[in-house]
Image (tube, grey):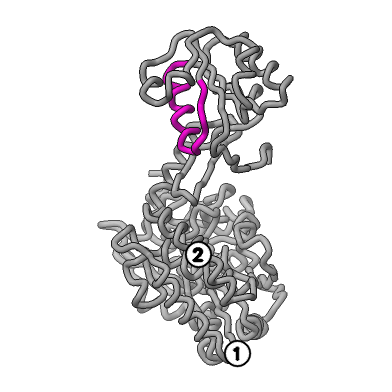
Amino acid sequence: MNTLPLFFNLTNKDVLIVGGGDVAYRKASLVMLARARVFVVAKSVDEKFFELLPSEQILQKSYDKEDLALANFAIIIVATDDNALNRQIYTDAHAKHIPVNVVDTPELCDFIFPAIVDRSPLVIGITSNGKAPVLARLVRAKIESMLPQNLSHIAKVAGEFRQTVKEKLPNMNLRRKFWEKIFADSLNETAVNPRLNNATTHGKQALTADDLAVALADFEQNLTGTHTGEVYIVGAGAGGADLLTFKALRLMQQADIVLYDALVPQEIVDLCRRDSDKIFVGKKRSNHTKTQDEINELLVFHAKAGKRVLRLKGGDPFIFGRGGEEMLACRQAGVPYQVVSGITSALAASNGAGIPLTHRGVATSVRFLTACYQSDEYLDELKSLYHKDETLVFYMGLHALAPLCQNLVKADVPQHTPVAIVSNAGRENQQVLTGTLDDIVAKQAVAQLPAPAVIIVGEVVALYGA
């Protein structure tokens, strides 16, 4: 982190802006939104300034060092095209220990203007530390599109109600859970109870203190007796963090305890709540740190202790992910749970490699299978079921590639049927190897693509690179 993000209170404080053009005007307008008192010094001043500021705060003159004594300036902003003048003002400001920002000159900046998402009192600042300001603005636009416009009102009402919640819920963890529930509903356009219906969604109605009082009463009522937590069974997708769903990310930020798999990249684990307890429970074909029964027991144990438990799984929980077993364990133990879909590796492999699993005139159906426990008897079923216009996708099959191909041929799948191995699907180091049932084993012996990998069998593979 090159700079420490801080929010500076400029209310009723003096700010000097040197420059009288469009850039200076935009900076003046911005700091005035923070209720600062602005002085402008410039030889030539745009007429717009006289509509923005009292005339006594506009000095149409060349900058002089003595101008720094006009007021007790909290910050100075320099927006001129004269590099020598900019450096002089920077030096003068430092002599008086006044923070200064020279626009578009990072080396002459004690502070940086971020791209701002304003839902006051909720304010979000995004900066690239002067390296890529256009990128920071694009990120701001992305965030703007995601957030409801009435968050400003919600934050104000919550602030007014904060002391009441503190008195009713003296336990800090309980207060955090209450507010997370309220704000999560606001962001998701759902309500914690009928009184909150529509009150937190895009300004259809205004959220009131009465609404929060009802929500707090409901929350307190639910605390009677033993407080049970909740389990979140979440698919982390296949690959990078940009494949996560918004809901997955929200629950990752709320969880007290995280149980994560070997296929979940560290960059995704790092997105979980910073102070959560993280437990690795990864299972590989010949190395299980925890058995499935032990994982189920951990989920139930921590949830019954009142914790919010995140079960973070690679891909999708219900596609060869044992998510169904974990769901049933929670259901049988009476533990509340949520299941959140993730992008399964078959889809990530297909899209990343440019191999459509279905394609008009080539494949009309697709089947997901696991090669981890395949037997000859199981694959013999393909003999009567496989059709040329079908795509087969095998999970966890790299270790059994040779017998897999042999058994497919025995099941009368033609030897010339195209095959693709997609390793590390959806990640930056994704690799693709193509061949046919009769030569893919030899090709893999040379290429040595690593696991995890999915194997795609069918005529659609011929579209790779086409």
Query: Does residue 168 appear left or right of residue 392 in this picture?
Result: right
Q: Position of residue 22 (x, y in %)?
A: 42, 20
Q: Nearer the viewer, residue 448 or 377?
A: 448
- Can residue 137 be seen by looking at this rendering? yes
Q: Residue at x 36, y 16 (%)?
A: 47
Residue assigned mark 2: 248
Q: Which residues are magenta?
A: 20-39
- When asked about the image quadrant of residue 65, the answer is top right
Is 231 rendered above or below residue 76?
A: below
Outermost residue toward the left in this view:
361
Q: Position of residue 80 (x, y in %)?
A: 52, 14
Q: Position of residue 343 (x, y in %)?
A: 46, 62
Q: Nearer the viewer, residue 51 or 126?
A: 51
- When asked about the image quadrant of residue 390, the answer is bottom left
Q: Nearer the viewer, residue 216 or 225?
A: 216
Q: Main secondary structure of the magenta part?
A: helix
Q: Nearer the viewer, residue 167 or 5?
A: 167
Q: Secondary structure at mark 2?
A: helix
Q: Residue at x 55, y 79 (%)?
A: 230
- Can residue 234 be seen by looking at this rendering? no
Inspect the image, locate mark 1, and give the three-letter code of the amino acid beneath it.
Thr
